[in-house]
Image: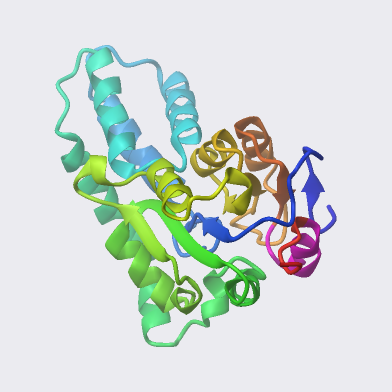
Amino acid sequence: MSAYEIIHTRVARGHIRHALFDFDGTLSLIREGWQQVMAPLMLEVLQETPQHEPAEAMQALVTAFIDRTTGIQTIYQMMGLADLVRERGGIPLKAAEYKAEYLARLHRHIAARLDGLRSDAIARSTYIVPGAEAFLQALSQQVTCYVASGTDVANVREEAALLGLDRWIAGGIFGALDNLEAYSKEKVIGDILSQHQLAGESLVTFGDGYVEIENTAAVGGIAVGVATNERSPGRIDTWKRERLIAAGAQVIVADFSAWPALAEYLGLFQL
């Protein structure tokens, strides 16, 4: 595809003052493969229930669940797992216990990546979505940039620092908190607009999950879907593309490698 794909032409461009980014899959590739960590855990748990489906149906159920919940906070995904256990006649653990087990497995999956970044044995660019750093650097000179993630906030901040992206994010890095009512992507978006007394067209959001796209579209902001194929950066993930369009994305990109053209289209450097 070209630098960007226009899904809806009626976009109020040229008014952007704030830019919000999802993190995993939008800026960072550190957690690439998390779905392949969560799915086996869910299958193991559900296969222990008295009324579980046959293996093939269970696999389809878990895949659909993860697809549907990508972008929300991990604890809510684990609450959903607990609900699935109850529906099949089982007695679930607490959602926090499922989350702890998932995070332990995920840490084993990404530990070598984190260690390599900490020791400089791995180049930062290896785990940055193509063009993201250059785009953030340029964009931060014009508008205020933020990150809002479904990952726990301490991990998001650490990983943003390891990738050297935190220096361009003056508005703040937000992520999941123990107090569920204290954080959501919807709340971050609402706070940005209310605190600065701005209309939705003053905000652009870049994300690969339906949550931030849907929340931004709901307030009249500009929603750019980042349909990055995390295993083959630079290529479009067709499933992500379809899902992002359904969530309300007005523009689709594969990554930020051609960010000057995207920025020109959005009117980002005509302020």
- Percent position of residue 57, x then y: 46, 19
Quick check: 240 above or below 176? above
- Percent position of residue 145, x then y: 52, 65
The structure residue drawn at horizontal position 41% and vertical position 77%, both measured from the top left corner, is 162
Secondary structure, magenta segment, majority class: helix
What range is drawn magenta here? 255-265
Quick check: 209 above or below 67? below
Q: Quadrant of residue 247?
A: top right
In the displayed structure image, the side of residue 159 where residue 132 appears, left or right:
right
Q: Quadrant of the C terminus?
A: bottom right
The structure residue drawn at horizontal position 64% and vertical position 34%, both measured from the top left corner, is 248
Q: Is residue 113 visible?
A: no
The structure residue drawn at horizontal position 73% and vertical position 69%, both measured from the top left corner, is 269
- Percent position of residue 157, x then y: 35, 68
Q: Quadrant of residue 223?
A: top right
In the displayed structure image, the side of residue 209 where residue 76 appears, left or right:
left
In the displayed structure image, the side of residue 145 where residue 226 appears, left or right:
right
Residue at the right extreme, as displayed: 2
Magenta stretch: residue 46 in it? no
The answer to which of 18 and 136 lies nearer the viewer is 18
- Percent position of residue 143, x then y: 58, 67
Q: Is residue 11 visible?
A: yes
Residue at the front extreme, as displayed: 197
